[in-house]
Amino acid sequence: MPAAPSYCYLMTVNTWSHPTRCRRTGGYQLIMLLLVMPTAAWAQEGSRNLEVVSQAPVEGGTGAMALEQDRPLVWLARQGGGLLGLDISDLTEPVTAYSMVGSLVHDLAVFQVEGTHYLALASDAPALMILDVSSLAAVQPVATLKRSDGYHALFAYKHSSGRALLFATSGGPVEAFDIEDLLSGQSAPLIAIDTPADVPAATKGFDQAFAGFEPVTATDRLYLAGAGGYYVYDVTDLDSTDALPLLTHISSAAVQRGRAIVPLPDASQALTLAAYRTAPVRIFALNNARVRTATEAWMADWQHEYVALQVRWPFAFVAALEGGLFVVNIFDPESPYTDAWYRTLPLADDAPLERNQRGIVAVDVRNEDGLIVASDLESGFWAFRLEAFSGWSGPQWGLPDMSNAQDWDQGPDRQQ
């Protein structure tokens, strides 16, 4: 009987190779190995269930990103300043559909009013610019807002009242604008919320906002991350002269300043990021006015820095700079685990706290077909497909249809 074949592994320059079969002949062992020579190029790594379907290099890299849900367009802020619009109709070859030279753009938000497509740009000067992007051949600014401090983050939301709102933050109070007012030349915000009085003055202000509708209580809720942790406000009544109700304050001892907060579609819990490297993604229950302890936490590596996330239950999509893109299964929020990952860069050799920011900085998901898009500070645009994930809507899971994507025609999902 011939001897059973043995298997061996070869340590290549970048990673382990696949098993290589070893054949025995005439008493000698012939080992057929494919040697990988050192190269300057980085061979990207990822899990088998996350496929790269597109990559469009952008010189200097890209930062902020906004994905249109109903048109094959993604907007990217160039790291060196200016704006880029990519037509991703053909993912094998994304095409530059629009390019604008300008100052550094901190954040982007897309929205619609009466069928017209708009793009908002947050920067230092002007603080806010709104472009009519309905026709890419005739993009034009239709509104600007100037203030002493620029805006750093935006969130566009279709309120239950029918108003289209834009929330803007800059490290100070969050301001909410009626978009139609902005388009008509009015610059006064509908509301402005600062951190509560008991938060130390040296660390006041908000950095990120998220808004969503909670159908059980029929309330519009504003989720804020900033000084003192995370906050949930009831913003249903935008015309009230009283202070807007603070529903929940998450004040974990481990988080002096929150970076981002995104609720689950049923608003029962929220995923959060903290504004420091080595912090995990923490999950908090939103069932009390004051919350101090996370119900669970997830991290792939303690050296990573998690900077942005989106939720399409049962998945969370997390941007981790040089750590790459992670898909976290949160079917059981008390037992999250890594479902898929992809890294666009090799990990740096220096200590985590001394590293420069590089890698994936933003992520989003197209609900119609489940396309995952990401922005990389060095290499530009990336698009991925997750195995067995071909789209998302809340009702498919018996949940409210709530995410960062908005229904600009019908408004929030009331589940009536």
Image: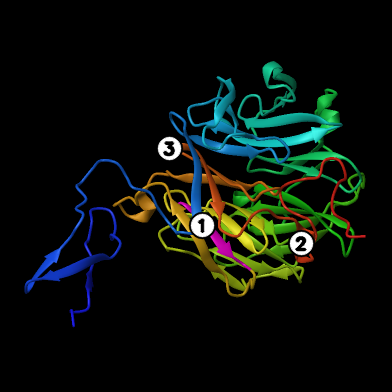
Q: Which residue is at the far bottom?
A: 1
Q: Position of residue 140 (x, y in %)?
A: 71, 18
Q: Which residue is at the far front?
A: 1
Picture quarter containing residue 246? bottom right
Q: Position of residue 318 (x, y in %)?
A: 55, 55
Q: Position of residue 42 (x, y in %)?
A: 32, 45
Q: Secondary structure at mark 3?
A: loop
Q: Per the image, is 380 magenta? A: no
- Which of the two marks, 2 or 3, is nearer to us in this view? 2
What amino acid is labelled 3 in the image? Answer: Glu
Q: In the image shown, does 354 or 376 lie closer to the viewer?
A: 376
Q: Position of residue 312 (x, y in %)?
A: 67, 57
Picture quarter containing residue 151? top right
Q: Residues within 10 Å of mark 2 (few under 14, many from 20)?
A: few
Q: Earlier in the sequence, mark 3 or mark 1?
A: 1
Q: Earlier in the sequence, mark 2 or mark 3?
A: 3
Q: Which residue is at the far left?
A: 27
Quadrant showing the C terminus? bottom right
Picture quarter containing residue 399? bottom right
Q: Is residue 199 visible from the viewing direction of this image?
A: no
Residue 378: assigned label: 3
Q: Residue at x 70, y 49 (%)?
A: 367
What amino acid is labelled 1 in the image? Answer: Phe
* Residues at marks 3 and 1, CA–CA distance in whole angstroms: 18 Å
Where does label 2 land, which residue? 396
What amino acid is labelled 2 in the image? Answer: Gln
* Residues at marks 1 and 2, CA–CA distance in whole angstroms: 23 Å
Quadrant showing the N terminus? bottom left
Where does label 1 land, which residue? 326
